[in-house]
Amino acid sequence: MNRRDVVTSLPFLAGVLSVGAAAQSAAPSCTEPELTDCRGFRFEEAPVRYSSDGAKTRQFMEGHMPGLNIVEVHETTIAPGKAPHPPHRHPNAEFFLVREGMVEFITDNAPMKLGPGSVAYCAPNKLHGIRNVGAVDATYFVMKIGAEPVCQK
């Protein structure tokens, strides 16, 4: 996945989120699990499913996040041994999609090493951070979603 892929998928994502929000308001009970913690998903451990036409899918996660109002997507590249900032908390959920390198996803749980193709999720107000534990630059995308504005004041 490159930057163009992420940017071109934003209209689709916005549609999915608006449909999901409409469905949520129409049906108060949700069958998907509520995403209330932080977790990493290694690419090589994601179960593979094949469709009848041979398409291969890896499902990393599915769940319910109430109150979605904002979406922000960015790409970050960090040098070996570095972190963009100390572990922190904020009122929005975040997804991390590792494109290149090896990172350590830091949470209140045990740190987890994630390589290319891996995904991590952090629920709102949970401690999380990321740092490059490899020998080369690490690049990853962040998708921030939630009820609180992303704007800096």
Image: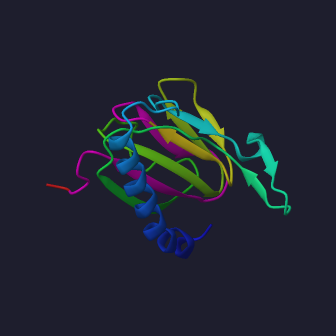
Q: Vertical placement of 25 versus 15: above or below? A: above
Is residue 141 left or right of 25 when viewed as pictured? Answer: right
As drawn, which residue projects farthest toward the left? 153
For the N terminus, the image quarter is: bottom right
Q: Residue at x 73, y 42 (%)?
A: 46
Q: Residue at x 46, y 38 (%)?
A: 64
Q: Vertical placement of 72 versus 104: above or below? A: below
Provide residue 153's location: percent of width, then percent of height: 13, 54
As drawn, which residue projects farthest toward the front? 26
Q: Vertical placement of 110 versus 89: above or below? A: above
Is residue 64 left or right of 81 when viewed as pictured? Answer: left
Q: Vertical placement of 54 versus 46: above or below? A: below
Observer-nearest residue: 123 or 80? 123
Colouring method of the image? rainbow
Residue 1 among those drawn in magenta: no
Observer-nearest residue: 3 or 25? 25
The number of numbered discs placed on residues in the rendered structure image is 0
Q: Residue at x 53, y 34 (%)?
A: 32
Is residue 69 left or right of 83 when viewed as pictured? Answer: left
Provide residue 49's location: percent of width, then percent of height: 80, 48
Provide residue 96's location: percent of width, then percent of height: 52, 49
Q: Quadrant of residue 11?
A: bottom left
Provide residue 116's location: percent of width, then percent of height: 68, 54
Q: Quadrant of residue 36?
A: top left
Which segment did they paint magenta? 123-151
Q: Residue at x 52, y 68 (%)?
A: 6
Observer-nearest residue: 104 or 49? 49
As drawn, which residue projects farthest toward the top? 109
